[in-house]
Image (cartoon, grey):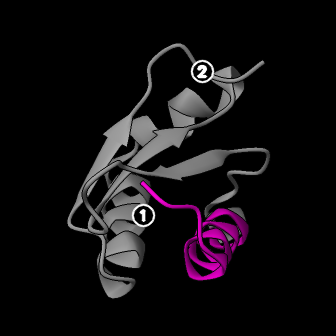
Amino acid sequence: MNVTSERLQKVAMLESGMAQFGLTGCRVRLCVGSEHEVHLEIRSQDFSRLVKSEVRMALLRFFQQHGIDKVLLLLQGRA
């Protein structure tokens, strides 16, 4: 996978967009080999927010609006 300015800009935009869901300090990583799949790392204290269906569904719509079809959540959480 090549690191390009376009990919970096997309990641930055997705990470900053997470704030509208109250998820700050998260990391979004584009998957190797797929522009339509991301790994999402959130802070441990934010997992309870994602349990709420309305937040989870809104988050999925946000990613879909930006061409992301699959969002994988890393369960270890960020410190």
Q: Position of residue 77 (x, y in %)?
A: 60, 21
Q: Which residue is mark 1?
A: 59
Left/right of residue 1 with respect to residue 25 in the rendered view: left
Q: Residue at x 38, y 71 (%)?
A: 63
Q: Is residue 30 above or below residue 76?
A: below
What are the residue bounds of the magenta stretch? 1-17
Specify the quadrant that holds the N terminus. Answer: bottom left
Of the residues shown, which amino acid type is indicated by label 1? Leu
Q: Residue at x 79, y 45 (%)?
A: 25
Q: Position of residue 31 (x, y in %)?
A: 36, 49
Q: CA distance from mark 1 to mark 2?
A: 17 Å
The part of the image, by quadrant, that contains residue 7 is bottom right
**Secondary element at image label 1:** helix
Few, some or many residues within 10 Å of mark 1 (<14, 14–19, 20+): some
- Decide which of 16, 59 is in the foreground and name it: 16
Q: Is residue 77 above or below residue 30?
A: above
Q: Which residue is mark 2?
A: 77
Few, some or many residues within 10 Å of mark 2 (<14, 14–19, 20+): some
